[in-house]
Amino acid sequence: MLMPFTMVAPSWSSKAKQQRKVVLCCLLWSITGVWGSQVIVPKQVNAVLGKNVTLECTVDVGSNLTLTQSSWERRLPTGSVTVAVYNPRFGISIPPEFSQRLYFRSPSSHDATIVLENVGFSDVGMYTCKVATFPLGNTQASTTVTVLVEPKVYVSAGSTALIDGGNETIVATCIAERARPAAEVSWESNLFGQSDVQIYNEANGTTSVQARYLWQPTRHVQGHTLTCVVRHPALQTDFRIPYQLNVQFAPDISVVGYDGDWFVGRENVQMTCKANANPPAHHFRWIRLDSEMPEGVEIINSTLLFLRPLQRNDSGVYRCEVANDINLRSRDVRILIQDQSRAERSNSIAVAGAVMGAVLALFLITVFIIVIVTARKAPPPSFSDKVIELPPTHKPPPPYSERAPAVPIGVHASQVAWLCQARRAGRRYDQTDHPNTEPPPSRARVKQQSPTQQSSRLEWTERVYINHREHYV
């Protein structure tokens, strides 16, 4: 806040000093923002050719300042020219060359925004918003206007038709024409194709961009959609154009009507030839390969009609031929006429199975009864019949005289040897010269037997013979 002061008859030199002090104070106040004002404009404005552009200008005036006038100037190579003036007291002033397409949006002490209609290339340049206040004078800020040219976008088909199984070709071309700056063009697709981008500079300073999509056609993607995407500063959102693929292919034929259950006497039967083709099929023909077409059969478009009950000689191979602008295709069907229907054959099989099952069951019951009756009439087995049969590898035991003596438990090896020698000597004596006399004593018997040997021999002779090396009962 300024403090009042009193001036008392100053001289000329003192007046000059006081004026310089006032100017310095005003400059200081304007720098520090005490009485300052501020003009706010964007650094750059993009205008679209042929459309309207808004040049924003916001004025921030101090509380102790008064807005006397706001204006817009355009800088040209020859100098600056005024294009619009707003004075709170005298109103709005616009030069004749801009009066038809320039106006203030909402003029006030805080808003100096103007709107320029039907922008052209001649409107490119720098524009300055000036604000005059009292007592500080003019404050200004500048912005640059750039004119953008919105591209013209369209999609065109390739020069040749897409044929199934053909070579790689141009499917479609997406063009962003005469844009400023150049647009970004691309293709979105789930196919295994590739995009080829070409850029052309036009004479008026614009640029055209072409994006071609190359791909090897196949019928399996017929009807799928590609999408051309164009991005440009003049467009608020991405520009997207769909393109549907049109792949031409030869007829894919299927025959309906024959269910495998055609039998003699069946009526109202027919076969229809269906074709999936692009372009659509225009030729249908039925023929019989193994003989002439039988009588009583009529062909209507793609349908083969039997106007009478089926006969045995209707069996054969029938061919359906279909053609379109791409190629001629055919499909063969082998017809077999049965004597009975499938249901009748199933019933016959079921009856035959039931009869065979009954016969088999009766046979098993008979065998069972015979076995039971035979078992009841047979005599009971005797004790001698109960013979344990040994395996074929079993050898019969040797005679008792040739059997090896069993070894009693607890007998020493020397005792066993002595007993064996005594037995062999006794057997030789009995078999030769003295069959009725006692065998001569051996050298083993000459010796006096110890009590232990006698008890061992007695114990051994009283034992039952068990030979563990032979397998018999």
Image (spheres, rainbow, N blue to C red):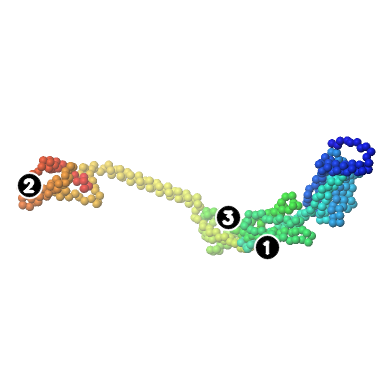
Image location (x, y in percent) of residue 61: 83, 41
Q: What residue is shown with label 2? A: 446
Disc assigned to residue 160: 1
State which tag comes first along the sequence, 1 or 2.
1
302 up-or-down from 59: above or below: below
Q: Which of marks 3 and 2 is in front?
A: 2
Q: Is mark 3 on a helix, strand or loop?
A: strand
CA–CA distance between discs 3 and 1?
Answer: 35 Å
Disc 3 and disc 2 in contact, CB within 8 angstroms: no
Residue type, numbered disc 1: Thr
Image location (x, y in percent) of residue 392: 24, 51
* Residue shown at the point (90%, 52%) measured from the top left: 96
Q: Is mark 1 on a helix, strand or loop?
A: loop
Q: Which of 389 and 402 is in front in this view?
A: 402
Q: Which of 69 and 194 is in front in this view?
A: 69
State which tag comes first along the sequence, 3 or 2.
3
Residue type, numbered disc 2: Val
Q: Mark 3: give few (<14), some (14-19) or many (20+) Cα within 10 Å.
A: few
Quarter of image, res 121: bottom right
* Residue shown at the point (64%, 58%) measured from the top left: 193
Disc 1 and disc 2 in contact, CB within 8 angstroms: no
Q: Nearer the viewer, residue 296 or 195?
A: 195
Q: Is residue 149 left or right of residue 225?
A: right
Residue 248 at least partly seen = no
136 up-or-down from 342: above or below: above
Q: What residue is shown with label 3? A: 256
* Residue shown at the point (18%, 42%) measured from the top left: 409
CA–CA distance between discs 1 and 2?
Answer: 133 Å
Q: Which of marks 3 and 1 is in front?
A: 1
Image location (x, y in percent) of residue 411: 16, 43
The C terminus, quarter of image:
top left
The N terminus, quarter of image:
top right
